[in-house]
Image (tube, grey):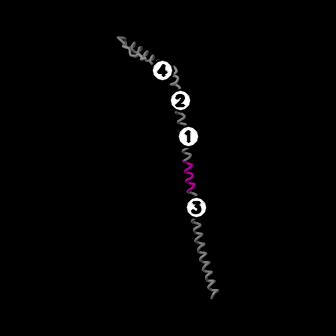
Amino acid sequence: MERPSLEINLPNTDEEGKLYVVDSLNNLNKLNACPDESQHALETTAGNNTRNQCLFFIIFILTLIVSLALVSFVIFLIIQTRNKMDQISSRLLSEKKNIEELKKINNMILKLSKRKILEKNI
C-alpha cells in the first residue's frame, strides 16, 4: 500500500484559507502518525525519563557520599599508621639506648671480674 501524498495544490485562495488548510492537514497528519495510544506512550515515556533522571541523580549523589566516606577512612588509616610507626620508632631508639647502656655495664663487670681474678692469682 502506498501512502497518499498530503501535498495539495491550492489554487487562488486567500492567505487565511491557505493557513487553515495547512493547519488542517497538519492535524490530520498528527492523527495518522500518532494515534491516541501512541500519545499516551509518549507521555509515559516522558514521565519515565524524568523518573530515570531523578534516580540517576540520587545514585550519583549517593556514590559521591560513599566515595567521600571511603577517602576519609583511608586518610584516617594513613594517619593512624603514621602514629603507630612513630611510636614504634621511638621505642626502638629507646631500646637501642638501653642496649648500649647494658653493654657498657657488662664491659665494666667483665673488667672488674678480670681484675678480681688477677688479684686473686697474685
Residue sitting nearer the eye, 52 or 84: 52
Residue 107's label in the rendered image is: none
- Quickly name the residue at label 3: 88
State the SS at label 1: helix
Circle 1: is it few (<14), some (14-19), or many (20+) Cα within 10 Å? few
* Occupied quadrant, residue 58: top right
Tell me the kind of residue under disc 3. Ile
Circle 4: is it few (<14), some (14-19), or many (20+) Cα within 10 Å? some
Circle 3: is it few (<14), some (14-19), or many (20+) Cα within 10 Å? few
| Residue found at x 52% / y 30% | 50
Mark found first going from the N terminus, 3 or 1: 1
State the SS at label 4: loop
- Quickly name the residue at label 4: 34
Q: Position of residue 81 (x, y in %)?
A: 57, 56
**Label 3, label 4: how many angstroms apart (C-alpha)?**
77 Å
Mark found first going from the N terminus, 4 or 1: 4
Residue sitting nearer the eye, 14 or 109: 109
- Quickly name the residue at label 1: 62
- Quickly name the residue at label 2: 48
Tell me the kind of residue under disc 1. Leu
**Label 2, label 1: how many angstroms apart (C-alpha)?**
21 Å
Q: Residue furthest top?
A: 12
Q: Which residues are magenta?
A: 71-81
| Residue found at x 59% / y 70% | 99
Residue depth check, mark 4 versus mark 1: number of the one nearer the observer: 4
Q: Residue furthest right?
A: 120
**In which quadrant is the N terminus drawn?**
top left
Q: Position of residue 46 (x, y in %)?
A: 51, 27
Mark found first going from the N terminus, 2 or 3: 2
Tell me the kind of residue under disc 4. Cys
